[in-house]
Image: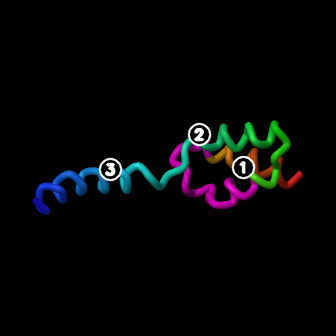
């Protein structure tokens, strides 16, 4: 019985681990929407948890840097 439950939990855990990690353009867009709503503190808390090097695409890194510049202003 325990082995049967384990067989179901292992793929779920592997999927969750695989999905987490790299930030996406969607997450940057959500931060951008916080900035438009003038929730700069919330936006800064979220974006400061990322590093520019963590983005795979150059366009995402540029978007990240643009948002960081906007927050610094």
Task: Tell which circle, 1 or 3, labels the residue nearer the N-terminal end.
Answer: 3
Q: Is residue 1 above or below residue 15?
A: below
Q: Which residues are magenta?
A: 43-60
Q: Position of residue 21 (x, y in %)?
A: 47, 55
Residue beneath disc 2: 25
Q: How far apart are the two marked residues, 1 and 3, measured between alpha carbons?
A: 30 Å
The structure residue drawn at horizontal position 37% and vertical position 56%, both measured from the top left corner, is 17
Residue beneath disc 1: 65
- 3 or 55, which is in the foreground? 3
Using the rendered view, name the quadrant where residue 45 is placed: bottom right
For residue 50, side relative to residue 66 (left or right)? left
Q: How many marks?
A: 3
Q: Nearer the viewer, mark 3 or mark 2?
A: 3
Q: How far apart are the two marked residues, 3 and 2, measured between alpha carbons?
A: 21 Å
- 36 or 1, which is in the foreground? 1
Q: How far apart are the two marked residues, 2 and 1, measured between alpha carbons?
A: 12 Å
Q: Crowdedness of circle 1 by 10 Å Cα count: few (<14), some, many (20+)? A: some
Mark linked to residue 31: none
Task: Tell which circle, 3 or 2, labels the residue nearer the N-terminal end.
Answer: 3
Q: Nearer the viewer, mark 2 or mark 1?
A: 2
State whether the magenta stretch is mostly helix, strand or loop.
helix
Q: Is residue 25 above or below residue 14?
A: above
The structure residue drawn at horizontal position 20% and vertical position 51%, both measured from the top left corner, is 8
The structure residue drawn at horizontal position 81% and vertical position 37%, both measured from the top left corner, is 36
Residue beneath disc 3: 15
């Amino acid at each position: 019985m325990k082995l049967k439950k384990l067989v179901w939990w292992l793929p779920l855990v592997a999927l969750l681990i695989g999905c987490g990690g790299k930030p996406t353009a969607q997450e940057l867009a959500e931060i951008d929407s916080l900035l438009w709503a003038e929730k700069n503190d919330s936006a800064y808390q979220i974006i400061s948890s990322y590093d520019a090097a963590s983005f795979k695409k150059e366009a995402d890194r540029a978007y990240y840097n643009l948002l960081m510049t906007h927050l610094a202003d």
